[in-house]
Amino acid sequence: MPSANISEEVAIPKIDEASKPKMWPIATVMATGIFATTFVQTQSLAYIPFNHLLAKMGYNSDTAASFLALCILPWSLKVIAGVLVDGFPIFGSRRKAYLLLSALAASATWLVMACMRAQYYPLLVLAISMNAAIVFGSTASGGLLVEAGQLFGASGRLSSLRVFAQTLGSALSLYIGGELAEYTMGGHHPLLATGVVAIIPLACMFLVAWFLLRENGASVQKSGLKIPWQRMAKDLICLQNLGVAVIVWCALHFLFLNSPRFSSLSFTQWIVPIVWMAFKYLYDRHREIFWVGLLIMFIQAVPTFRSTCFYQLQIGPLHYTDDAIGKLNAVGPGVALLSAGVYAWWCRRSSLVVSLYGAIFVTALSALPYLFYSVYTPYMPRAVTIESVGTFLQYLAYLPLFDLIVRCTPKGSEALGYAVLISVWNIGLMIGTKTGPTLYEHILNKNMNTLIWLNAGVTLAGLVLVFLVPRALVEKREGA
């Protein structure tokens, strides 16, 4: 029969299993990129060596602080890197090319720093250039995280892996940086050993991206961010954006006025309008991002005691030494790694909305152990326990928020969307770490317990914002 012949002749297309994307290579590239770009930062591996070198060169702490603050300026421009990574493929690549170029450029600048003599301004220019290079690697890694999280339905597990890689990179780099500063800073090339150590993870980032990451040129062109430059330029100069920019600039200027900690970071005031413009562009494409951004901003902007005021309490009435505080701070990375493992297990057993409600309660709960802090000499074990429990709960609470960021980022704007929401996170954190000490000093009469209760109570108001997050984003558990 004709129909039978037709059915016999029509071949059912077979799926080429080898061509299907797999999660583990993308996850490996992403984690390696996050680890490397965290490890080699001036605030990580180079932090203690740079401080040691600047002191040896005769510069005071204020000049050294200005040096380090200028070094990290490229991280304030991560939103612009997101636009470039999403909107300008290089030879058909939106991720791989940027990772490779980032590793090469950062390795080159570290090599030059390793071979040069100690000179302030050349070192400053190279350090800024190195950070600018790794910003693109970090942004591309964030884009990979979002793409893989959405493609494989693994936003929770991959967010846990990101936190694990970032925390491990930060912990190892600070420890190794201290050893390098102690034993390898002599001679005519004081940063030689530091530069060699920095190149190792960057080389791993290059090799892993080169061999494991595969991108389809056609899909890149189809899914890439189409940037309406004329509309964005028009939006930038509209009265609404100019008004927001003026209000935010004035608010930040008033908030951080005469604050030594932030005096070198006033450049951030000019970055906020850029973040606002990018956020507005994403909002036009994906309106659900508004409630996510609002929730993240609120949680981070709650006045916190985890700032300079708690340090002043530790070294003042509680009589902790800097060495003891350093040991307490070392507790954080270990428990952060543990919390990443716990959430990687939990996210496949519960919906994200349950995790978000739990995150609000856990964030508030994480503050309460600090009510029991006592003086240093007889109560160091208690302080270690408090820091362990408090930090574990805090990191565990943050992971559902990272999960939510991955889920709500618009397709085609993965790097930009992730960078914008992380920038919103950082702006909120900047506000929270300033308003907490302000209240402590001028309103609460230096009553730390009152600030801790205030932090926990205000955080619970975030339950209302969780309720407003669109159900489509959070109603399913991972893998369902």
Image (cartoon, grey):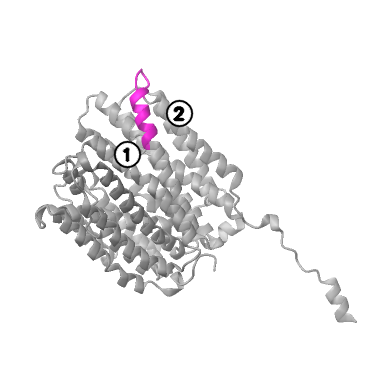
Q: Would residue 177 be counted in the magenta stretch?
A: yes
Whole-percent x, y for residue 422 in the image: 37, 55
Quadrant of the rendering where the N terminus is positioned: bottom right
Query: For the residue labelled by badge 1, is the local secondary structure a helix, a strand or a loop?
Result: helix
Give the image quarter of residue 272: bottom left
Marks 1 and 2 sit apart, C-alpha to C-alpha, by 20 Å
Q: Would residue 186 be counted in the magenta stretch?
A: yes
- Asked whether the viewer can see residue 13, the reply is yes
> Residue at position x 44%, y 65% from top?
408
Q: With respect to residue 107, does 24 lie above or below?
A: below
Q: Amino acid at mark 2?
A: Val
Q: Which residues are magenta?
A: 174-190
Q: With respect to residue 175, does 149 lie above or below?
A: below
Whole-percent x, y for residue 174 in the image: 36, 36
- Asked whether the viewer can see residue 87, the reply is no
> With 297 as the anchor, is 377 left or right in this view?
left
> With 271 as the anchor, is 313 left or right in this view?
left
Quadrant of the rendering where the C terminus is positioned: bottom right
| Residue picked out by circle 2 | 196
Q: With respect to residue 388, does 399 lie above or below?
A: below
Quick one: 26 or 76, which is closer to the camera?
Answer: 26
